[in-house]
Amino acid sequence: KRLPFADAVFDLLCLAMAPLGGDALRVLGARGHLLRVSPGGEHLAGLKEHVFARAQPHRRAPLAMPDLQHVDERRVRFACALTSEDRARLVAMTPMAHRAPQTRLEEAIADGPETVIADFVVDVFVRASA
């Protein structure tokens, strides 16, 4: 889908938990920066174990673009306290809602962990060409 912006108008783009589309590069200016926030390996640890029999660590998709240079990577990790209402909202906005059996989701919401790990990796890229 085409973004409703002119070419090369942004100095900074932030993609949080979203794929990089070619149109994002179209609107990124020369020497512009791209921040990509993606789940780290332990993201939602605790909750995933309640939902899946074999919870797998998240694997980050590589981002190899010829005109982007990777200049930094930071990990942000913290614990989050959750009520059952929080767990229901969290499950609803993750791929777990579509991949797991409904009974496992309901059990995780009702009796899941009171604390989960939020684990993110922030990658910083700079555009190497116009």
Image (cartoon, grey):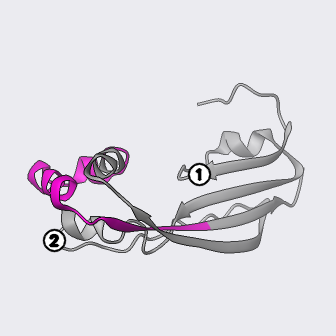
Q: Residues within 10 Å of mark 1 (few under 14, many from 20)?
A: some
Residue at image position (64%, 65%) is: 122
Query: In which quadrant of the rendered image does the N terminus lie?
Result: top right
Residue range in magenta is 92-121
Three-letter amino acid code at disc 2? Answer: Ala
Question: In the rendered structure, does residue 110 fall within the stretch colored magenta?
Answer: yes
Residue at image position (69%, 73%) is: 73
Marks 2 and 1 sit apart, C-alpha to C-alpha, by 28 Å
The percent coordinates of residue 107 (x first, y second) are 13, 56
The percent coordinates of residue 112 (x first, y second) are 22, 62
Residue at image position (39%, 62%) is: 81
Q: Is 111 displayed left or right of 113 in the figure?
A: left
Q: Residues within 10 Å of mark 2 (few under 14, many from 20)?
A: few
The percent coordinates of residue 90 (x first, y second) are 36, 50
Q: Picture quarter containing residue 100?
A: bottom left
The disc placed on residue 16 is: 1
Question: In the rendered structure, does residue 105 fall within the stretch colored magenta?
Answer: yes
Q: Earlier in the sequence, mark 2 or mark 1?
A: 1
Instruction: Name the residue that disc number 2 marks.
Output: 53
The percent coordinates of residue 44 (x first, y second) are 38, 65
Three-letter amino acid code at disc 1? Answer: Ala
**Disc 1 element:** strand
- Outermost residue toward the left in this view: 103
Residue at image position (70%, 60%) is: 65
Q: Is 14 displayed left or right of 121 in the figure?
A: right
